[in-house]
Amino acid sequence: MLEIVIFSTLNGILYGLLLFMLSSGLTLIFSMMGVLNFAHASFYMLGAYFAYTLGMHTGFWPALILAPLLVGALGALVERFGLRRVHANGHVAELLFTFGLAYVIDELVQMMWGTVAVAYREPAYMREPLFTLFGTDYSIFRGVVILISILMFVALWYLLKKTRVGLMIRAALTHGEMVGHLGHNVPRLFMGVFGFGCALAGLAGVIGGPIMSTEPGMAATLGPIVFVVVVVGGMGSLQGAFYASLLIGLIQTFFVAVNASVADVVNAMGANLDPYGELGRISLATLAPMTPFILLVLILIFRPRGLMGELEP
Amino acid sequence: MLKSLFTFITASLLLVGTAGAAETVKLALIDPLTGPMAGAGQPAFEHLKFEAKRINANGGINGKDLEIVGLDNKVNPQESLVQLQKAIDDGVQFVTQGNGSSVASALIGAVEKHNQRNPGDEVLYLNYAAVDPSFTNERCSYWHFRFDANADMKMNALTTYIANNEDIKKVYLINQDYSFGHAVSKAAREMLKKKRPDIEIVGNDFHPLAKVKDFTPYVSKIQSSGADAVISGNWGQDITLLVKAAAEFGLDAPFYTYYGASAGVVTQLGDKGVDRIYQINEYYGDFEDPEMAKRQVEMYKETGWDFYYLRLSTMLDMLKKAADKAGSTDPVEIAKAMEGMTLETTNGEVLMRAEDHQIQLPMFMSVMKDDMEYGAEGTDYNFHKVARIEREDVTLPTTCRMRRPK
């Protein structure tokens, strides 16, 4: 039992951290520009594919730096030459633009890398166990992924709270016009934030690709969950996104790990449900992929502003 | 004179015209060609096209060329029905599909209905991998022919192998949460109970089809259950990612699978799969038959996919044999000819049983090995034969009571 708890916690945290890396960029972009970027998960996918292709020439570590930079640059270009023009036509146009972009990226990826998963893997030496507990190995790569994620969060926190750029971003979040009037180049700031958010998604792709498999469907699988994170955490709240990511990561892993059915849970709370009935016999493990969406519905009903959000959506 | 010459020319022109149009027989593959399960559909598509060339070089289907048409269904039953209609509208008379018994179930119903309503315009459904046992039992259809052993036959062979291995005491079952996965789990529990009552089933998990990206939570569960062996009917990315996660977490229990040699497994696992992944299938990766070895080498060079689906070759060979025997490419005639037909394959004789249209064939247990003469996916790894289970030990009775056209 203890080993299940330990490994589920580790796996849940790892998954949660990856989710946060994706959703932090999304929530930053949203709070600043008011754009819900539907193509965000596509940038995550591009990160994985870029790292796969670059990695064949440069090796894993340079690709770890180069691929997110490339994705970030691409994101900046999209903002500068696409989104900024569309912006004049209002939010609906922007939404449609990112929606279309997601499709375009999906198709391009299939054309360039094929419809089947590519063999993007971590270097062989990182597949060795970092430690072995109760006969289960925990690979070095997973340790490295956790480390990279934590380092990235510290860097993000430092950037936002301690630097001048961070000050400008935070100011632009709430008083964009004023920052502009003070002589700062707000459009350029927007472009930077959009590119930075995309780069974060790209980084998540680089380290998530080997774990979750690099295939053209990877954006579509994670996309909806990232939106759930942003809504559950509270639109525009980084802190909220962080807690929501970890929460969803842990819930999803623990639901799989627990050997219980719906009836077991409901009956433990005092109800009397037939354990062999249509509803009662469903196991929690089967429900696991649904949990983020159940959480989304519950949050929207009982706490529409999300865990840490300041505004009603 | 001039007039008769003129009629002769127009008549021969017309003849050439109609002959040219009717010279190909279209076989439509309705399978996932994009998306997460494309790894299962794409190699089948390439295999069919590769083997169609051989068939056509040997005189084709009763003199007509065989043409393979690929239609993407994304493993979605609704989408498959749309594609089926499209195929029928294009004059396709033979459809084949394999990935997903959910899809197969929809197709059987649709083909049955179509043939009932459009006599003279029948369509034949050749199933190469959808192995839900009900399709050749209670739900059997005259228009459906299955060229793969069904889930129960595979489990029959697999459990016979496990029953002979005294070291296995605890078995864990993990399968996809739909009709096929449940059929595998049920067959495993029933047959193990009969053949080895001392074996304990320590886990019986179902996970959603093609949705799980990270199997590590399942693997820690298997690990802590203390299982000596895992049985899984998973296919597509669900098997690749499952065994990958197991290897990564150092799970020592061997995996007894239906589709362990699916595209991507060998590349993803490398060394960690050796002696750990077993597969029950109609073929394996030794290629002792020089003719098969030649096809493996050629097909990999031409298409980048391995010669994995021997049953697709069997299917096309049998289609040709039936058409030649019937002297026609009419689906009704071919169906009649195919009933009870035998075919000599590299593994010996196979039989298309007339009662239920379920192929009867020997099965092989193979295990992933290094340094193989013909490696899969351009590596040195492939699946080495460890046991042959004869046709009469694989076969199972059927409950099918087929309604035949008059």
Image (cartoon, grey):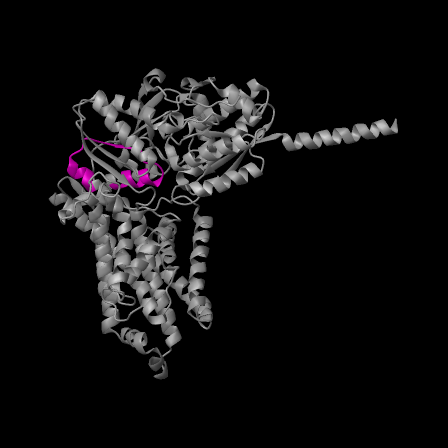
Observer-nearest residue: B267 or A37? A37
Q: Position of residue B276 (x, y in %)?
A: 25, 32
Which residue occupies the extreme front position in the image? A272
Q: How many marks?
A: 0
Q: Residue at x 21, y 61 (%)?
A: A243
- Eyeballing the image, is B115 above or below A237? above
Observer-nearest residue: A40 or B263? A40
Left or right, A189 with reference to A157:
right
In magenta stretch: residue A75: no
Q: Position of residue B78 (x, y in %)?
A: 44, 42
Left or right, B139 with reference to B143:
left
Q: Position of residue A10 (x, y in %)?
A: 18, 50
Quadrant assignment for the N terminus of chain A: top left
Left or right, B334 with reference to B141:
right
Quadrant assignment for the C terminus of chain A: bottom left
For residue A224, say whether it is visible: yes
- Eyeballing the image, is A277 above or below B66? below
For residue A129, say whether it is visible: no
Observer-nearest residue: B248 or B141? B141
Q: Residue at x 23, y 44 (%)?
A: A285
Q: Toward which corner of the image does residue B271 lie, by quadrant?
A: top left
In magenta stretch: residue B242: yes
Stretch in magenta: B220-245
Which residue occupies the extreme bottom position in the image? A182
